[in-house]
Amino acid sequence: MIVEMSRLLIVGPRRLLNGVIDEVQRVGAVHIDRIETDDDAIRALALDDHARAEQARLEALHARLDGLAGLLPPSGGEPAAAVPALPAADDLDAVEAAVAAVEAEVHGLSRRRLELDEEFELIRTYEGAVRALAPLMDALAGSRALESVGFILRGRDLTVVAAVHNQLRELTDGRVEVVSRAIDEGKIGVVVAFLKRDADAVRGFLSRAGIAELRLPARYAEGGPAEAIRLMEQRRAALPGERAEAEAALAEAARRHRPVIDGLRALVADRLAQLHAAAQLGASHYVFILHGWTPTAQVGDLRAALRARFGGDVVVEEAPADPHRAAEVPVLLDNPPAIKPFQRLLGLFKPPRYGSLDPTLALALFFPLFVGIVIGDVAYGAILFSVGWFLRNKARGGAAWIVPVVRLRMTPPVLADVSWIIRVMAVWTMLFGVLYLEIFGDLVEHATGWHPIFHRIELATAFFKFAVALGVVQVTLGNILHLLIALRHRHTVGVLESLALICGVVGLVVLLGAMGNELPRTFFAPGLVLLIAFFVFFLAGFALDRFAAMWLLEAISGMGNVLSYARLFGVGLAAAVLANVSNELGGRLGPVWVGIIAGILIQMIFFLFTLPGHLIQPARLNWVEFLTKMKYHDETGNSYRPLQKTGGD
Amino acid sequence: MPDFPYINARVRAMRGRLLAPTQLEDLLAAASLPALIQALAATPYGHDLQEALTRYEGVRAVDDALARNLQRTTRRILEFADGPPHRLITILLLRWDLANLRAIVRGRHAGRSAGETLEAVIPAGTLGEGVLREMAGSPTMTALAGALEVVNHPLAPALAAGVAEDARTNDPLAIELSLERAYAEYVLRQARGAGARALREILTAELDAANVKTALKLAPAGLPDEQRLRFFTPGGALVTDRLFLDLSDEGRQARAWARLRAQGFPVKELPRDLVAFERTLDAAMAATLAQRYVRGDPLGLDIVTGYLTMKSAEVANLRLIARGVLLGLPRELVRREMVRV
Amino acid sequence: MAEVISPTRMNLLQRRNQLRVAQQGVDLLKRKRDALVADFFKIVRQSLAARDQLAAACRDAYVLLAVAKAVEGREALEAAAIPARRDLLIDIEVRNVWGTKIPEVAVVPVRRQALERGQNPVATSARTIESAANFEEVVAAILAVAATEIKLRKIGEEIKKTTRRVNALEQVVIPRLRGETRYISSVLEQRAREDVFRLKRIKKKLEAKAADA
């Protein structure tokens, strides 16, 4: 059902602007729209400098709060700490101070974690060098009066080392010690130890020879290479622990600060929404004009709330929305609780246009039904149902849930809706499972020899006809809905089109079915009559509008759409056959119980892989074939998005 | 090449996280740097940006976030590769090492502090930020060479040799030229064999472009042959040392250019405006590299190369946008300098 | 006229002489001023052109620098700038216009090749090189502006000085001299009249005495 909307004008003196927007947001029922007028006296309300400055500060705050929310690890559902008192939204200084306080702590902790990561990475990079040098350093251990440098020579030839050693000995009058060892292919690690007073000479020689002294990170290297290596190994052992500590501190901070951050974010987001809304209003010199849309049922509440706060200073003017100029009216769908969750299936598209029909009811009926027809297995149904139940409990828990593997975040309302859709699908699946007598495929049939009421593999032809019949029903239903819309709008060509297409599609299917001996011969005559009726409507339409020529094509494509429902048959048959094949595979593995378990396991793998297809095919039939027929996609509306307190999202 | 199908599938999945041109345009439209930072926080760079903001502010934070993101991207690709692909990708990453080493060497020469030097460094290569910080902070050139040696980097011997030559002849250009040549030699040596064809093509094309650029810049100086040849990096496919000499000689330039064009060099006309020429050539090179993503061998290095090109072009563009916004450059100017791939 | 001047004929002649010299001086100074003003306007035109050139050079240079900074990063630019440092020697020649010493700054070529700046052509982009070249243009433009503006300032000061002198002569010295001349001549006239009168009286007295006697 599309909720009835009223066009709303709220007019008041400009000094009350902030108060009115605040109240409108509190009630949360007005979808604010730009005002369009030719009157020169009414201009778009420009925010003054003060408001613009406030907006800039709020936007900066919002970004900082988002940043904080991103830096803190997601809280794992533990009880939130008590929410401390939050500053008022108009006291930006206080809000900024509160944010800065949290920021200081969280930034400090994040920085610490980053630095630990970096240190770890640094030590890891130096690992090779440390491994090469450590044994050589050990050889020179204990000589504190000496200075030592390590370097790597390329080449296998140890004579190079000897040459270097000779030259160094000459340079220092023999007061030098050189140890070396081959590290890996083509590299020799060398450590030279010498007296401190010879340091300059030795270093000068090395750099002239193009030998680069190995340097360990400066932060460890103070006490010489041996000490540095010891330090690095010590740090390497300590770092994982420190990192875990930093993580824990962050998690702790998250637990403490998240309520504040969320609260402040809601505060800032709501105030920003108010400013954005204000920028959409119109104004004359003395008054502001708010133009918007409200569900007719809520106008009274809004009027009462405004009257209570502002008395007679603010005027609310209401007019019913005109369904014939529906493009600008925002659309809110509402349905009974059992059907409402299925509105999510329409969530992919824009909502239907105001004044047309809400197809949710049909989707709520057909989508789970089709899934049931395709899967049709009591056991699978039960599994689906338990998944639905699990999600329902998650939703009741009141916390968002992140779907594993795909990392999709689902809020409780989404979870509740999804769980309901899954449970309805599960019930249909079980019903058809009983009809097909499939519990994990044909296990029961194997075990007991009972015969199902409808064996979809044996009765493949009948199953096919059933699927196509569903197609006729749903495609025709789509056409009928379009007919209703056309009637409501007194759109003659549309009425003729729907009638022509109903007759054309049904006529074609029946006629072809009868001619191909798939239907009893008696269907031939009615089919012919329907086709003649199609031509009559078509000619009438063609007289009014040349575009009616397209109807000929559309009737044939409608026929194609009907046949498209055969995919239910195809996918369903494949599901049943796959289950049976798995059972057979399992059966060959050995004893009965092994076979059963193996069969079920194989089935579960198949099921997991085919499940997306089992959901997408029925969904596609509803989205493409059905919705196209009711010309849903030709004219859509805009969603109803009232100005309301959002809680920061 | 056993692993490339898997790597390429993963890389293709990462492509979806690149920013669309409209997003870049929106970022460019930011009125101020804080507004840009806000807008950037809503992109895949958001998390890195938040982390960067804990340590730096302003354009430095943006730079840090971009570099960190680029580094994480390359690390991720390396993580799901091993064997020959891992080796090839590592070689591909050396180009950033070369650029970073150059920046650090220059910083050292100029006597900059480690922090200032690090600003010019993009830690996207094989050298991590920690090592780069360590090197930027080394007290002498020799120490810098040693720091590179310690991490067992393929360019370490070249750096050491360059430093030794600099010490002998007091010519800071020696280090850079030595690094340049060593990089080309190393990559060409590693890129032998059928599996590395893409890498070889990329490098030879890049060497050609670099040599042509150098030659054109040298031409007005009128140096004798042997002095010009010092700036030639061997290894390109089109530009031989003789062609290089001809190109860098104003008298023989036009004829040499005709030869270059005949061999299929991407820029056809002998350029008058060197700045525009470099821009065109860089854009053409980047576009050719990025094309590998679409047209290249789906079972080879092409996808990774193309992706990395697009990613680094995006990072370069974002750096440009950040500075453009900070300095208040006209948007048209920034747009002209952006690399489109 | 605080000081008391003795109204003597000597003084009168002196003042008259001074007045003539002052008037001649004013005349001369005015002619000098006219010549300086003509020169001034000629140089103003040059100076404005030089200023325009400097503004244009600066605009180009700073835009390219900003772009280079954005594309290549600050470090690459600064590194390219380090070896390029040098001292620029400028010849300044002093010219004499109407007795005024005006410095002439000789514009020396400042543009260099990339290699002369010590930049590595392999790793330095054309944008950086061009940016450096642009700033050398700016230096050249600054020199040109300096050359004209120093002249301009000197001449301007000279014109001001001359005008001040003219004014001093015209407003102060000449009126004072005129006043003094007037005063002296009036005193002298008075004195002459008194003498005449006195003489007449004496003559009358003498005649009366003669008549009595």
Image: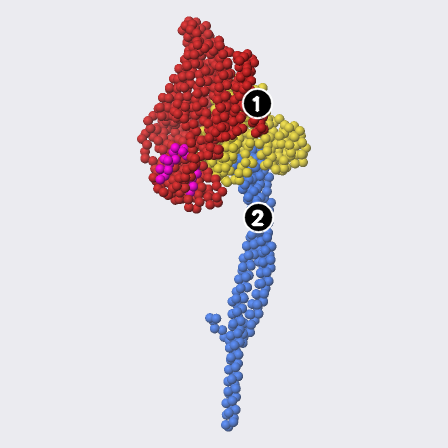
Chain colours: A red, B yellow, C blue
The extreme bottom residue here reads C213
Given the image, on which type of amino acid does mark 1 rest?
Phe
Observer-nearest residue: B333 or B119?
B333
| Image spot of residue C86 (x, y percent) | 55, 42
Which label sits in the foreground, 1 or 2? Answer: 1
Magenta-tinted stretch: A288-307
- Quadrant occupied by the N terminus of chain A: top left
Q: Residue at label 2?
A: C52
Q: Residue at label 1?
A: A535
Q: Chain of mark 2?
A: C
| Image spot of residue A581 (x, y percent) | 47, 9
Observer-nearest residue: B36 or A324?
A324
In the image, what residue occupies the spot 35% across and 41% down?
A310
In the image, what residue occupies the spot 47% across and 36% down?
B36
Observer-nearest residue: B139 or B189?
B189
Instruction: Name the side, left or right, on which A451 lies relative to B157.
Output: left
Report whether residue C56 is seen: yes
Q: Chain of mark 1?
A: A
Q: Is residue B118 magenta?
A: no
| Residues tagged 1 and 2 counted as in contact (Cβ below 8 A) | no
Q: Quadrant of residue B134?
A: top left
Report whether residue B308 is seen: no
What whole-number distance in Å separates the C-alpha atoms at marks 1 and 2?
A: 82 Å
In the image, what residue occupies the spot 53% across and 23% down?
A501
Residue B22, compared with residue A499, is above or below; it is below
Label 1 secondary element: helix
Q: Quadrant of residue A360?
A: top left
Circle 2 packing at 10 Å, graded few (<14), some (14-19), many (20+), is some
Given the image, on which type of amino acid does mark 2 rest?
Asp
